[in-house]
Image (tube, helix red, strand yellow):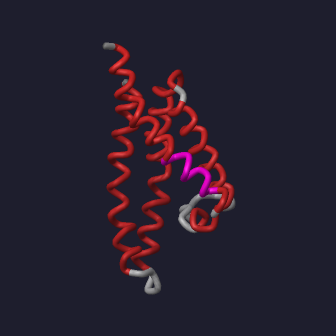
């Protein structure tokens, strides 16, 4: 019975780990889009925040992938999604202000904001399994 409980938490954790791993890699492979959404109010270079968040995403992905650290990984993922939310808000504000941004990008940026909520709740569920 305990094995089934463990198995039910494995798939969501690995899916979230894959999402974070892919995103973390993109922070290094294509940093410019991430640089552009770093809130301007933060001190320092945007690229430093881009790389730091990429490292954080890769670390959290690893924690989620390993059964022994999965609960911690769930908590860290929730915190990470909360921490990057201001960048997503900045991106949405910039897109809505832009006259050049395609309408589909504007709509997508608005729709994406509330999608952080299920990511956070899923992370917290993983942390409790």
Predominant secondary structure, magenta span: helix
State the residue in front, 63 or 80.
63
Relative image position of residue 45 (x, y in whole percent) = 68, 61
Relative image position of residue 107 (x, y in whole percent) = 34, 72
- The residue sitting at 45% across, 42% down in the picture is 16
Vertical placement of 100 versus 87: above or below?
A: below
Relative image position of residue 36 (x, y in whole percent) = 57, 68
State the residue in front, 108 or 67.
67
Instruction: Report the span colored magenta.
Output: 19-27
Q: Determine the residue located farthest toward the bottom in the rendered image.
A: 99
Image quadrant in which the C terminus is located: top left
Vertical placement of 129 versus 75: above or below?
A: above
Relative image position of residue 60 (x, y in whole percent) = 55, 38
- The residue sitting at 43% across, 86% down in the picture is 99
Vertical placement of 67 versus 2: above or below?
A: below
Q: Quadrant of residue 63?
A: top right
- The residue sitting at 50% across, 35% down in the picture is 76
């Amino acid at each position: 019975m305990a094995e089934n409980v463990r198995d039910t938490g494995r798939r969501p954790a690995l899916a979230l780990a894959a999402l974070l791993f892919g995103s973390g890699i993109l922070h290094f492979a294509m940093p410019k889009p991430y640089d552009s959404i770093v809130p301007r109010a933060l001190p320092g270079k945007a690229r430093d925040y881009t790389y730091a968040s990429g490292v954080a995403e890769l670390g959290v992905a690893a924690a989620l992938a390993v059964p022994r650290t999965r609960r911690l990984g769930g908590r860290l993922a929730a915190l990470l999604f909360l921490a990057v939310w201001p960048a997503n808000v900045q991106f949405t504000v910039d897109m809505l202000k832009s006259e050049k941004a395609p309408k589909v990008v504007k709509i997508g940026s608005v729709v994406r904001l509330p999608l952080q909520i299920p990511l956070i709740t899923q992370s917290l569920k993983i942390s409790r399994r």
